[in-house]
Amino acid sequence: MICTYKFGVNNVHLFVKWIGTHAEYDKLCDKNEQYTVDIN
């Protein structure tokens, strides 16, 4: 799971950006794309 967060004045919002298997995550890491997953 890849998540991001946004800080508000009174709270923090956590957004799930990607959910996958460990093998799928390894493929993202091999391509150096684990930090480029974005919400479309």
Image (cartoon, rainbow, N blue to C red):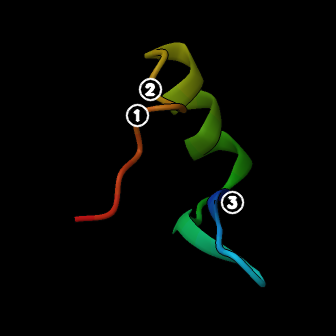
Residue matched to label 2: 33
Chain-order first, disc 3 or disc 1: 3
**Residue sitting farthest toward the front:** 9
Question: Is the residue under label 1 in contact with that under label 3 (CB below 8 Å)?
Answer: no
Mark 1 or mark 2, which is nearer to you?
Answer: 1
Name the residue beneath numbered marker 3: 1
For marks 2 and 3, the one nearer the N-term is 3
Badge 2: few (under 14), some or many (20 or more) residues near its Cα, within 10 Å? few
Asked whether 36 or 13 is in front, the reply is: 13
- From mark 3 to mark 1, how far is it between C-alphas? 13 Å
Mark 1–mark 2 distance (CA, rounded to whole Å)? 5 Å
Q: Percent x, y for residue 4?
A: 61, 57
Q: CA distance from mark 2 to mark 3?
A: 14 Å
Q: Amino acid at mark 1?
A: Thr
Give residue 7's position: percent from left, percent from top.
Answer: 68, 65
Q: Which residue is mark 1?
A: 36
Kind of residue sitting beneath label 3: Met
